[in-house]
Amino acid sequence: MNRLFHHVFFVVPALLLGLWTGSAMAEGTLKVGVLDDSPPMVFRSAEAEIVGYDVDVLQEIGRRIGKAMQFRVIPWDEKTEYLNSGKIDVIAAALMVTEERKGLYALTAPVVKKFTETAIVADSSPMKTTNDLSGRTVCTMAGSSSNATVAGFRGPGGPVAKQSQAPTLEACLVQVASGEVESAVMDGVTCAYYVRHNPGQFRILSGELSVGQTAFGLRKNETQLAAEFDRAIADMEADGTMKTLGERWFGSHE
């Protein structure tokens, strides 16, 4: 257990990221609320810097629209409150597009066009496919789209036996590793990253629980800013930047 997440995490309270206080930011800077345990989308490097696919995409969008991006780790189940209160201006970190989120945020054009949710288990688990989640205990991160995915799951043997929520993805994986729960549900690329960087501890169940897209979330009234993001994303698609960033992060870290 001492090796768990060695490649990704540091025992640092989220607020120590503290990249700004509640004071007003300089004009031209967008405050971005993120997770720090969702590799390869957003996570901490060995130097404790916030890095990942979403970070690189946002930095490039910022370059094109003339905005600096400043990243802050936030409680994921409080992201809407942080956004609407002005503590942040953008929600990022594998933000899956859902009907509920369409009503809450001005969502940008997709930045990942095929994004899956699946289940991760201890390597010693007898489970083989996501259908085996029926009657099992499952952890999801509070505030994630996986909560609704698991709540709506119906395998051949029925629903899961119990669904618990943890504040972070790392906390869910600690529960899996300790045997407190039998599985955790999260996005597929993050599952793959944890399996790769914790050999012999975890594996992914065969089968996808959901397939969707990810985007960035802005305040509902920020229509002009959303349009600027969308133009930048379209240009990045056209000139190959999105493909290059995808290959950088999903090719080498997945």
Image (cartoon, rainbow, N blue to C red):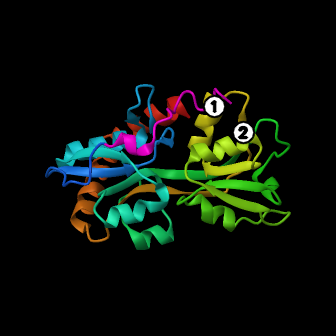
**Is residue 24 depicted above or below 105 in this figure?**
above
Are circles 2 and 1 on residues that touch, CB within 8 Å? yes
Residue at image location 64% in from the left, 47% down from the top: 172
Determine which residue is flagged by label 1: 4
Q: Residue at x 86, y 43 (%)?
A: 126
x, y (%) of residue 122?
75, 39
- What residue range appears in magenta? 1-18
> Relative to the observer, which residue lies in front, 33 or 54?
33
> Which quadrant holds residue 124?
top right
The residue under the point 41% across, 56% down is 215
Q: What secondary structure is the magenta-colored segment mainly?
A: loop
Figure quadrant of the C terminus: top right
Mark seen at residue 149 = none
Residue under label 2, please give it.
Answer: 177
The foreground one among 245 and 68 is: 68
Residue 4 forms part of the magenta stretch? yes
Residue 143 horizontal side relative to residue 246, left or right: right
Q: Secondary structure at mark 1?
A: loop
The quadrant the N terminus occupies is top right
- Viewer-proximal residue among 113 and 142: 142
Please tell me whether residue 95 is drawn above or below residue 128 in the rendered image: below
